[in-house]
Image: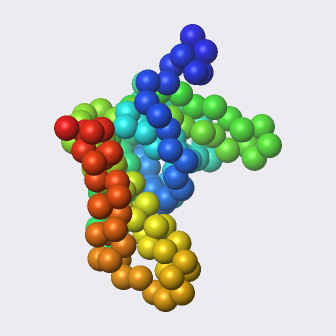
Amino acid sequence: MTEKERRHFLRHLLVYPLEFQVSEDEAFERTETINVSEGGLMFLSKRDVAAGTVIKLNIPLYEKVFNIKGKVVHTIQDAASGLYNVGISFINYADAFKVKLIEQIYLIEEYRTLRSLQIGKEMSLSEASREWIKRYSERFEKLYW
């Protein structure tokens, strides 16, 4: 099966921090996402992680850390950097939904920064959130309800 055929969900290029842990007896490795989708995400790793491994992910958002579990679907080493692109699928709907909400908050923050530049003054996060919800909440609702 080709890479294209394996993809069931649209991927969004989105970089945000995360930590992952392969087993209980090791420390979390800090890294960042490459992309996210409704079904999973991809992140960078300094090491190979075997397909089928269930790992823990911690995704920070402001002062909160969201704990999520994922199953490694594939690991591909990038020849240029030597780093591994690790693709995981979410184990349950609740974790997928958490990540989707985190993604929306990161996108609102990016939107706030862009709008602040456009209008020439700092836009608050609550103002940006209201605009974002007005523009995109219907699309979000269709994806998940």
Task: Tell me: residue 79, above or below residue 34.
Answer: above
Q: Is 31 situated left or right of 138 in this image?
A: right
- Direction top: furthest residue: 1
Q: Nearer the viewer, residue 98 or 127?
A: 127
Work out whether residue 142 can be spotted: yes
Give the x, y percent position of residue 87: 50, 35
Q: Is 54 situated left or right of 14 in this image?
A: left
Give the x, y percent position of residue 79: 77, 37
Work out whether residue 24 can be spotted: no
Q: Is 104 situated left or right of 87 in this image?
A: left
- Direction bottom: furthest residue: 121
- What residue appears at the point 50 percent right and 38 percent down from the top-left corner? 11
- What residue appears at the point 57 percent right and 10 percent down from the top-left corner? 1
Task: Tell me: residue 68, above or below residue 30.
Answer: above
Give the x, y percent position of residue 49: 53, 34
Give the x, y percent position of residue 60: 37, 63
